[in-house]
């Protein structure tokens, strides 16, 4: 997609449909649809990370629209493809540290994908609320079906990240990823506690988003509430060592 076409696309997505309702998004239903998945993204036009403001402050509507599309692409990728993970669960009494590795997504929706679109925009004080749709290909429909079958289990958890993110110079998307990673760790940990009679030492598998996560600030940190689908392929007990 050329820069000119991208600019036109952003203009249509952010300005022309602002305060309107399209046929596709009349109900704003984020549930399961065979051909389309949908989600809601909130963009703060006056973002502050700890004691640091964003590079652009306040955000223009064009920048806010671009970020909404980037964030939506991240979540749609997480819903369709998911991530592989390896979890060293750890044991304080035995001096074994806890480490959670959430690897690169199995697949990604690229910036400018024509099947990704903003269907509705609402201006709420210093925030913009975007509804985004993604039209699934045949192969992606099959992937979504796999996430709903077999031994895949549902999980929900909260994740946390400092206001400034994992490092003092973190960008806005780094913060989103950091909080999501913590939520994924917590979801898998609680799942293993509820299903394994003996606490395992390690676990590995795949995890995907079940829907778009919700981010907010509480007690001086970023919080995310996220729903996942988890496929655990390998569990290693302490007895194996």
Image: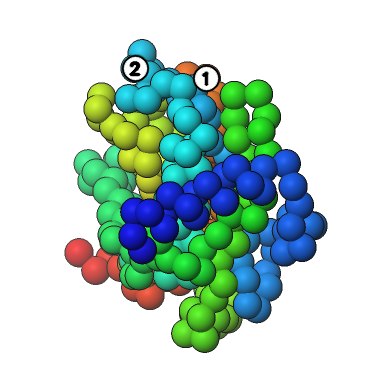
Q: Is residue 175 left or right of residue 18?
A: left
Q: Residue at x 38, y 35 (%)?
A: 172
Q: Residue 228, relative to residue 225: is it above or below? A: below
Label 2: how many Cα within 10 Å (few below 14, some 14–19, many 20+):
few
Quickly name the residue at label 2. Answer: 52
Residue 196 appears at what percent x and percent y?
47, 64
Q: Is residue 204 left or right of residue 66?
A: left
Q: Residue at x 60, y 62 (%)?
A: 133
Q: Residue at x 33, y 60 (%)?
A: 2
Q: Residue at x 48, y 52 (%)?
A: 8
User: Residue 236's quadrant in the figure?
Assistant: bottom left
Can you tell which mark lies on residue 37? none
User: Residue 36's quadrant in the figure?
Assistant: bottom right
Disc 1 to disc 2, C-alpha distance: 17 Å
Q: Is residue 106 visible?
A: yes
- From the viewer's side, name the closer residue of 166 and 129: 129
Residue 137 appears at what percent x and percent y?
51, 81
- From the viewer's side, name the closer residue of 176 and 241: 176
Mark sitting earlier along the chain (1/2):
2
Q: Secondary structure at mark 1?
A: loop
Q: Please name which of the two marks, 1 or 2, marks the residue nearer to the observer.
A: 2
- From the viewer's side, name the closer residue of 228 and 9: 9
Can you tell which mark lies on residue 219? 1
Q: Secondary structure at mark 2?
A: strand
């Amino acid at each position: 997609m050329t820069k000119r076409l991208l600019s036109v696309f952003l203009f249509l997505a952010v300005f022309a449909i602002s305060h309107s309702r399209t046929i596709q998004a009349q109900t704003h239903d984020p549930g399961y649809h065979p051909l389309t998945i949908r989600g809601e993204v909130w963009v703060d036009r006056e973002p502050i990370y700890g004691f640091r403001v964003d590079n652009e402050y306040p955000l223009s509507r064009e920048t806010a629209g671009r970020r909404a599309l980037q964030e939506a692409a991240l979540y749609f990728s997480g819903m369709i493809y998911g991530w592989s993970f390896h979890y060293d669960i750890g044991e304080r009494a035995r001096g074994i540290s806890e480490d959670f590795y959430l690897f690169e997504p199995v697949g990604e929706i690229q910036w400018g994908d024509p099947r990704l679109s903003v269907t509705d925009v609402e201006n709420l004080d210093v925030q913009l609320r975007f509804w985004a749709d993604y039209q699934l290909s045949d192969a992606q429909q099959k992937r979504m079906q796999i996430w709903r079958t077999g031994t895949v289990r549902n999980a929900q958890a909260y994740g946390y990240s400092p206001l400034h993110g994992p490092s003092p110079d973190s960008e806005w998307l780094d913060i989103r990823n950091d909080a999501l990673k913590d939520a994924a760790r917590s979801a898998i940990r609680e799942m293993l506690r509820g299903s394994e009679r003996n606490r395992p030492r390690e676990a590995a598998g795949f995890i995907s988003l079940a829907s778009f996560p919700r981010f907010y600030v509480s007690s001086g940190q970023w919080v995310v509430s996220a729903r996942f689908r988890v496929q655990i392929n390998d569990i290693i007990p302490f007895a194996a060592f």
